[in-house]
Image (cartoon, rainbow, N blue to C red):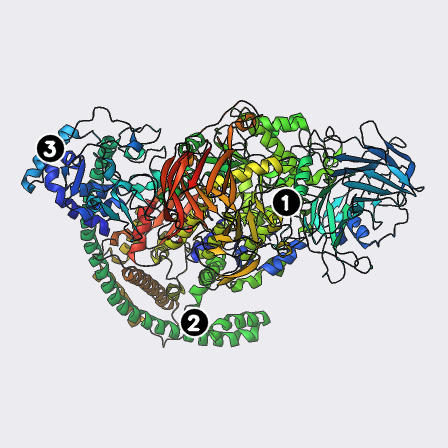
Amino acid sequence: MATEGGVAWPHRWGLGKAMEQCSVELSMAWPVGRGVAVEEREQRSAAREEGNRGRAVLATVLVVDTRTSRFPGRRRLEKEREFPGKPSPSPVPRAAATMRLHALLLLWISAAAAASRPPLDTLGIPPLDEAYFRGGVIRCRDGSGKFTRDKLNDDFCDCTDGTDEPGTSACPEGKFYCQNAGHSPITIFSSRVNDGICDCCDGSDEYGSNATCKNTCWEAGKAAREKMKKKIATYKSGVIIRDQEVEKAKVAFAKDATELTKLKSEEKILQGLVDKLKEQKKLIEKAEEKECLRKEKEEKRMKEDAEKQAANENKDPDASQDVDSQETHGNVQEDESKHDPEIQDDTSIKAGPGDESPPKDTSAEPTKEQEPTHVNSEDLSREELGRLVASRWTGEKVDEVSKDDRKEHETEHDMPEPSEEALEDELDVPEPAEDSYNGYHSEVEDDRLKFDDEDFSNESEDEYADDHDEHDESYKSDDDQKADDHSVHSDLTASGQASWLDKIQQTVHNVLQTFNFFKTPVDLSEASRVRKEYDDASSKLSKIQSRISTLTDKLKHDFGKEKEFYNFYDRCFESKEGKYTYKVCPFKKASQVEGHSSTSLGLWAGGPSPLVNSTCEVL
Amino acid sequence: MAGRVGDSSPAPSGHHSSQASRTHAVRGSSVPDPPGPHAAAAMDPPPRWRLIPLLLLLLLSSSSPAARAWKKDEFRSCNQTPFCKRARTRGPHSLDAPLSLDAGSLFVSPDGSLTAVLSHPSRLRPLLLRLSALPPHVLRLQIDEDYSANTPPHRRFQVPDVLLPDVEARTLHLSEPKTAGGVSTLALSSDVDVVVKHDPFELTVRRASSGDSVLSFNSHGLFDFEPLQESKPEGETWEEHFRSHTDKRPRGPQSITFDVSFHGADFVYGLPEHGSTSLSLLPTRGPGVEESEPYRLFNLDVFEYLHDSPFGLYGSIPFMIAHGDSASSGFFWLNAAEMQIDVLAPGWDGAASTENGRIDTLWMAEAGVVDAFFFVGSEPKDVIKQYISVTGTPLMPQQFAVAYHQCRWNYRDEEDVAGVDSGFDEHDIPYDVLWLDIEHTDGKRYFTWDHSAFPNPEEMQRKIADKGRKMVTIVDPHIKRDSSFHLHEEATSKGYYVKDASGKDFDGWCWPGASSYPDMLNPEIREWWADKFSYENYKGSTPTLYIWNDMNEPSVFNGPEVTMPRDAIHYGDVEHRELHNAYGYYFHMATEDGLLKRGERKDRPFVLSRAFFAGSQRYGAVWTGDNSADWDHLKSSIPMVLTLGLTGMSFSGADIGGFFGNPEPDLLVRWYQVGAFYPFFRGHAHHDTKRREPWLFGERRTALIREAIHMRYSLLPYYYTLFREASLTGVPIMRPLWLEFPDDKETYNNGEAFMVGPSLLAQGIYEEGQKSVSVYLPGKELWYDLRNGSPYKGGVSHKLEVTEDSIPSFQRAGTIMPRKDRFRRSSTQMVNDPYTLVIALNSSSAAEGELYVDDGKSYGFEQGAFIHRHFVFADNKLTSTNIAPDNLGNKKFSTDCVIERVIILGLSSAAKKAIVEPGNQEVGIEMGPISLRRGSSSVAPTVRKPNVRVVDDWIIRIA
């Protein structure tokens, strides 16, 4: 997950890398006593970022100690706590860069665990600012006034911006600097000074309170350094992974792109064949129709019953230009149970995020249910009334509450699983178990938010068909999904595209050649052969088209500069937080799952960055 | 952790609406809708897929007008309430059987009270009247049936445990009345007497010297007292129906009605709790008054209450104060049944408006007895003190309770709690208390924890406590009917629940589902309840955990008007109708007692209650319940809090930001600026609202909110001193202007501005984008802008430009306010910080003020462990003297705190130094800013570091 920061890290780390080789810990432990930062800007800004100590640590690598001075001890500060065994750090002259390492080593050995306390006239002042306070009369930084040096840190606020009280709590707007030798310096609000709570790991903020602060800088610094090292390692391995991903992506992308090109050309050819077969089929049907009419006439004379029957048979061919009416029929029957939700699907996707207008299916609804005003609490049972009134405060659906309730104590309210799942389907994902090829192609356009690859996996529908209630939110595991894709794919490609396509072409050619449609009555076996070939070919065609649309859709996404997220397309990530499980499927959707209930957190909106963010946070 | 959807959707309780949240998510936003009042329309779960259109409709249909009309129907109007309708339609002096006083029965009984019989030939039982007096000017009138003549199956209910236990003992021994011409006169004090007219019975309290009436009872002949009946007369029905509910009323009609007149009054105030933008109680009936309901006192959990309506809300205090430029008086009727009160416009009785300033009122109650108190004050504060003398002084809160509270329904889990806690630190915003609402429990079983969200409650509290902060958890009266819940099992087996009309444990619906309610009228049950707060019983509680009592009206979701049926039965065979308004009071009382016990009576309890009754001030704070995030509710919060203060509930506030809905960021900022002055200062929000911790609205607004909270923290010494005053006298923290300026008529109905104590005046900003505001500054002295020290003349209205950084606020010339100007994480860390005194000199270059300090938590102050200083500035000298009485005990409190800064507004800038005595130490005077905010300019002579200790006597002389 090489974010910008991630890329930046190793780079910055490079500065300290030489030292790392020497001794990471040593270099980290450097800032002892008061220091002047070489990279001062860096250091100050870093220190300001509370909670990002890592950066400060890095920055302090380059801090060089120059002066130390003993705390002179002033009236207000008499109560100060002495640090046990505080050695006096040796003054270090400004050294040439080449000498720094030696100086550091010495310092670290002699004073690593010691916290030195600055004198009153430097108390709470960042080393870089010390110069500002040197004169006899000092200006408030905001220009609002000035003060004499004896008013510096005299525990009375003279500058409202806090200039004169960097080391006390007297000015509400002030900041206190703790050097935190052994760790990284931080700047805290003046209000933390002597408030009885240890804020600086060196305890320097509690020089005048009753609090006894242990100097924890060394331990904290060590931990921070460890953490930093780990982080660096993580980033490093991240960069490696990223590079690998980029490589893999290249391959996968090329593969997909090639496939797409191939499929497109196949589609063209196949389309031609299908068209021809269709033509044939039409002719056959016309012939059959004629035949029928002829038979009809004959039979009419013979029987009234037969006549009626014949009339019925005529209907379809009459009305239809729809060549595949038979298939359509078949599918409709097969799919009857699924049909409704599917319609819902479309409408709710339109209505959901947008105008919220009720889907047209509401017309099927008893009007009573549509009107909130029907809520007449007088008709409710006592319990229903209780739930209803409670729901005003909670904003919950009444049945939700009861569901919760049921969960809580076994229970008496036996109602159908609340419509959660249904809604889920409607707003999010279509069932993978779609069995309908017909109309599929056009649907793709509307369902851009859906995952076509799932729809495409029709071959394995049976696997999915039943468990959707339970797992509607969860994807098939990645492997399964790939397997599906693969199976589909192999269906099209396994036997070698050339031979597969050739075979079809050959067969169709044969069929077309053998078939003599001038022959009357139509040769039934030939007619059915044409039909079968047509069915096969158009089925293949629609599969190819689906696959094309899937691929096109996939390739449309922005997978990052180097397509580094290409392989995330088919993956999902899960993270458990308390009782919730968060699932994020990059480029698809995210959801929050609690037990059997699942809440959609939204669909993929495009662009890799939101994904990266949410993924990172969730994981 | 941004992995969760907003705050609203996956409520940690696990019973969140996933439909709703999903809709939000798909809309690409975690911004929840305002909670739809219709959001629960489905009676039977419709087929799954059909729910969507329904849901969409529901989401679309949460527009408020329909919602309001719809809700209104769920509450009884006066017309739907037979006793109210009957009483309200009756004309003056039109009763068939007016009661008369039997002159022969009048005598002073051995206990010093005066008793008499009220009767009428048509009545089965006469009534017994008792008049007693409490010094200085309190008259108590009690009227009940004389059960000796004829005993009904039940007696009328007299509310126990509300009056202070020593009220009887403090009763004066009255002298024999003088009777002549059907009128008896009784001296109450040297200045006040009572005139009792015999037939029909009428009572007038008047000033003896002038003969001016102050208060009168039944001067319009509306006093009616429905006698209890032995049994239901043939053919009559006692049942009452409201919506689907039937009230069997097995004891028949028993209402009481009477009229009370306040003479010399321009306005009447009081009778909380109602949403109102008017400080005074506007007339509900009479010429020129739009059709209105009477003020209703009936504790109800009203969903999204109206900001301006006489309908009853969560609490009831049947106490009214009248004020005019010549008189202040008060009337209190101790009765816990449903009460309706009309304020009658002049001419309502057909009489031409004659007398200058008289306000007539009509009081109607469904049951109970007459136990009424007449208060006669020369000043309005006297009236409050008299009321407090019978109902008790407000509890002295701990220091932390006076600081800022952060609440939300709900902080989800320990991580959330830690995040909010550190958020305050990161933004340098102080706060003292973090609250947990119902979701912290295991399935709304109070005294338990949801262990998946709060696995280590003790550790969590300890971490918060390490920063000197406290936590509050909610404990409501509805107990989940769940056989595995020990509290329920115990209450059931001990028979501690309120019973329904048939004698079974009353089973109502509230947050946990089926619930029952402990019968808090019973002292034994209160005792039992109190014990539940011990550390042993309340697992996971620590000494820094305090309590919030919500839903104690009581709220019963499936009950009539969302409360308990009136025919439910309490301890002593008392019907719920008789004590309804006091149920929450007893519950609050028991909880407070629990915390007292827990802390071995050394730790002052903090219990916030939503329901309240007269006397609730003794047990803790209240708030104005579930308000809404709109400007109107911000505006009405001031009259509401002021009214609570006038009626004893000095520790109160409104939810900052508004409970329901999402406040515009500007509204939120204004609310903090106004709310920082509420005595009880808490931010709270509904779970369906966006998060609104102070730092979530950009840097500028964070700074503004921080500033508002800082202002409150700097004034904590002043507030704490005011709380002390309230705990002694009942004079509220936040006061209507007329309480400080009783002669200034301009102030009488000013509900937009308010005083905090005697020294500070603030005016809220209640409109979005308001550019200027007119502020009336009463009195003759100057007022100094709290921010920059600019002086403003008193006695005039000032048109002021509105700035975003504060609401107009002023210090009154002639006052001294103690402050602490160092802002810490919480008030706990401010304990040793030095003080600033801000002196605003009046026209005679004088000023005075007080400072009260104690340990901020214990009861040591009761034995004298406190500092109480009086600061006087006069003749260029600031003197600090001790005003703590020395007869309280031998405990001492001390502190090393010093005064680091004395700002003197109105002092000549020529002053350069001061001498501190004793010691004759010289200290400098420099021009300094009035506040230490960045960019403040130096405006006033400031004594620099006199560093005198607040415990000592000293003088600072301007040289």
Q: Depth check: A184 or B234 in front?
A: A184
Q: In this rendering, do the residues under marks 2 and 1 share a single chain?
A: no
Q: In the figure, residue B774 lies in which quadrant?
A: bottom right
Q: Depth check: A533 or B918 in front?
A: B918
Q: Can you say which quadrant of the picture contains the C terminus of chain B?
A: top left
Query: In the rendered view, does B168 fall on the left or right side of B309?
Result: right
Residue identified by numbered label 1: B646
Report helix, strand or loop for mark 3.
helix
Indicate the position of residue A298 as horizontal and vertical percent values.
Answer: 52, 75
Circle nearer the viewer, 3 or 1: 1
Mark 2 to mark 1: distance in Å? Answer: 84 Å
Q: In the figure, residue B417 lies in which quadrant?
A: top left
**Residue A105, numbered circle:** 3
Report helix, strand or loop for mark 2.
loop
Residue identified by numbered label 2: A322
Report helix, strand or loop for mark 1.
helix
Q: Depth check: B343 or B732 in front?
A: B732
Indicate the position of residue B865 as horizontal and vertical percent values.
Answer: 51, 27
Residue type highlighted by circle 3: Leu
Task: State which tag comes first along the sequence, 2 or 3.
Answer: 3
Q: Is residue B682 visible?
A: no
Asked if the residues shown at circle 2 and circle 1 are in contact, with their CB atoms under 8 angstroms apart, the answer is: no
Asked if the residues shown at circle 2 and circle 3 are in contact, with their CB atoms under 8 angstroms apart, the answer is: no
Name the chain under label 1: B
Residue type highlighted by circle 2: Asp
Residue type highlighted by circle 1: Leu
Indicate the position of residue A19 as horizontal and vertical percent values.
Answer: 11, 39
Name the chain under label 2: A
